[in-house]
Amino acid sequence: MLKRRIPVLPIARVALLMLVFAIPTAACSSDTSIDGTYANDVEGTITLDGGTWTVTQGDSSSSGTYTVEGTTITFLIDGQPAGAGKIDGDTLTDPDGKIFTKT
């Protein structure tokens, strides 16, 4: 019985090509489908725009950056974690558990 040997070189090339294309895509991915303004009648709005967030309540506002992993959104201020919430479709739950709906 002859055993067929799978050439290693082509498999290594395919793996390398997958890495070459996957790493830049992962590094640049910003889930723009979540971009927009989320409102809560009492708390104001949270606006997400390509990795930056702005919270507006009345005349005051604050801002920073955010990262998303799965359904978890982590808000950062000056590069430091300020809290994590959840994002599910058109609903954003802030780190305090308050619910905002995409407008």
Image (cartoon, grey):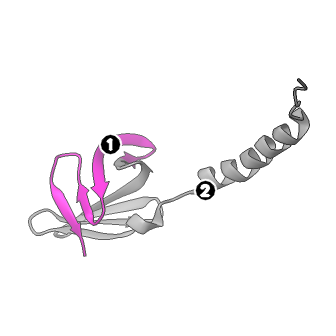
Location of residue 100 in the rendering, given as x and y in whole percent from the top left corner: 20, 63
The crowd level at tag 2 (other Cα within 10 Å; few <14, some 14-19, many 20+) is few
Looking at numbered disc 2 in the image, what kind of residue is underneath it?
Cys
- Residue that extends furthest to the front in the rendered view of this protein: 1
- Kindly identify which numbered label has been placed on residue 24: none
Closer to the camera in the image, 102 or 4: 4
Q: Tag 2's secondary structure?
A: helix
Q: Looking at the picture, tell me which residue is in the foreground, 31 or 82.
A: 31
Dot 1 alpha-carbon crowd within 10 angstroms: few under 14, some 14 to 19, many 20 or more: some
Instruction: Find disc 2 in the rendering and name its residue.
Output: 28
| Foreground label between 1 and 2 | 2
Q: Residue furthest top?
A: 1
Q: What type of secondary structure mainly makes up the magenta span?
A: strand
Position of residue 79 measured from the top left corner of the image (x, y, whole percent): 46, 44
Residue at 85% x, 43% y is 13
Amino acid of disc 1: Ala
Answer left or right for 88 relative to 50.
left
Q: Is residue 49 above or below residue 23?
A: below
* 83 with respect to 101 (left or right): right
Q: Determine the residue positioned at 56% across, 57% down.
A: 29
Q: Quadrant of the N terminus?
A: top right
What is the C-alpha distance between the residues marked 1 and 2?
22 Å
Task: Identify the residue at image location x=16%, y=58%.
Answer: 99
Upstream in sequence: badge 1 or badge 2: 2
User: Residue 5, located in which quarter of the rendered image?
Assistant: top right
Query: Is residue 60 covered in magenta?
Result: no
Question: Which residues are the magenta region?
Answer: 75-103
User: Dot 1 lies on which element?
Assistant: strand
Q: Residue 69 vs residue 1: left or right?
A: left
Q: Position of residue 76 (x, y in %)?
A: 39, 47
Q: Residue at x 87, y 26 (%)?
A: 3
Q: Which residue is mark 1?
A: 82
